[in-house]
Image: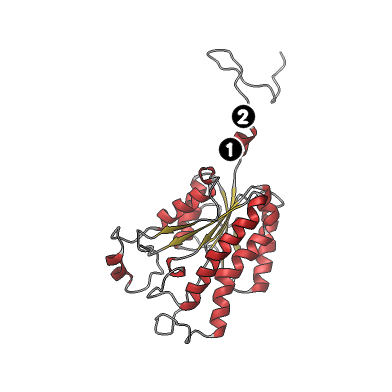
Amino acid sequence: MTQASEETPERCPITGKLAPRPSADEAAENEQKTLVLTGASQGIGHATAKLFQEHGWRVLTCSRRAFTSSCPWQEGPEDHVQIDLGDPDHRSIGLAELKKRLAGGALHALVNNAGISPKSEAGSRLGPVDTGMATWRLVFEVNFFAPIVLARGLMEELVKGSGSIVNVTSIAGSRVHPFAGTAYATSKAALAALTREMAADFGPKGIRVNAIAPGEIDTPILSPGTSDLVKGIPLDRLGTPEEVAQTIYFLCAQSASYVTGSEIHINGGEHL
């Protein structure tokens, strides 16, 4: 007796009828998807990497730190790229390494989560006058230029994957914040505007671009005094990295297939 070829549909053991072949859309939905995630070394980055892996995604992580055993995903050492996003030369090297890891395959999501918010030596907020020009440039290199450099550099792979880009902005991008410095706030406002521009330009290529704007999230980098801000939050608590990660995943999943150019507030109503 000859065996059925792999192309022969299976029969239902009860009815004997041939099982329907999966559609092209179903096959694409079932293939392993790939995410490139920056700022993956702690907090929101950790939670995002963990959630996507739980959903079967391959996660290529990027941060200026080397991979450590504290990172909560198994494939980290093989799929981690150490990139200093604030250094244009090192950023180019890291981008080339990411493209090498992708090997010409599809990229289904790019999450630009990396961001820096320098403080004064005393730990206080840096205003427009006391922020040195070197600090201004560094903040914009990481928070604003890196997202567009990565999106442009990975465009071919994103087109192949009909990819989704999520830029992480901030509540500080739309209001004066007591802890976030001026350079950080303006870089996040610029990133929100960039998100709209990217959505308009990349949409015809099949790429969706959205942003999330977290408020007070319970991470290791919270500033002293953040607990006082909870009094002005309608939900009366801090957010969690896992709640932010869930929103990021929604924007990268098929459930958000008609969502682009949006900025979603994740702040418990603090922006009201």
Instruction: Point out residue 6 in the picture as x, y percentages from the top left corner.
Output: 69, 26
Q: Which mark, residue 67?
A: none
* Disc 2 packing (10 Å; few <14; some 14–19; many ≥20): few
Dot 2 lies on which element? loop
- Image point (56%, 47%), residue name: 57
Check the image and report above or below for 105 versus 7.
Answer: below
| Residue placed most toward the observer, 19 or 126 | 126
Instruction: Point out residue 39 in the picture as x, y percentages from the top left corner.
Output: 52, 64
Residue type for callout 1? Asn
Check the image and report above or below for 93 versus 18.
Answer: below
Quarter of the rendering occupied by the C terminus? bottom left
Q: Which mark, residue 30?
A: 1
**What number of labels is visible?**
2
* Disc 1 packing (10 Å; few <14; some 14–19; many ≥20): few
Q: Is residue 83 visible?
A: no
Dot 1 lies on which element? helix
List the residue tagged with mark 2. Answer: 22
Q: Are marks 2 and 1 in contact (CB under 8 Å)?
A: yes
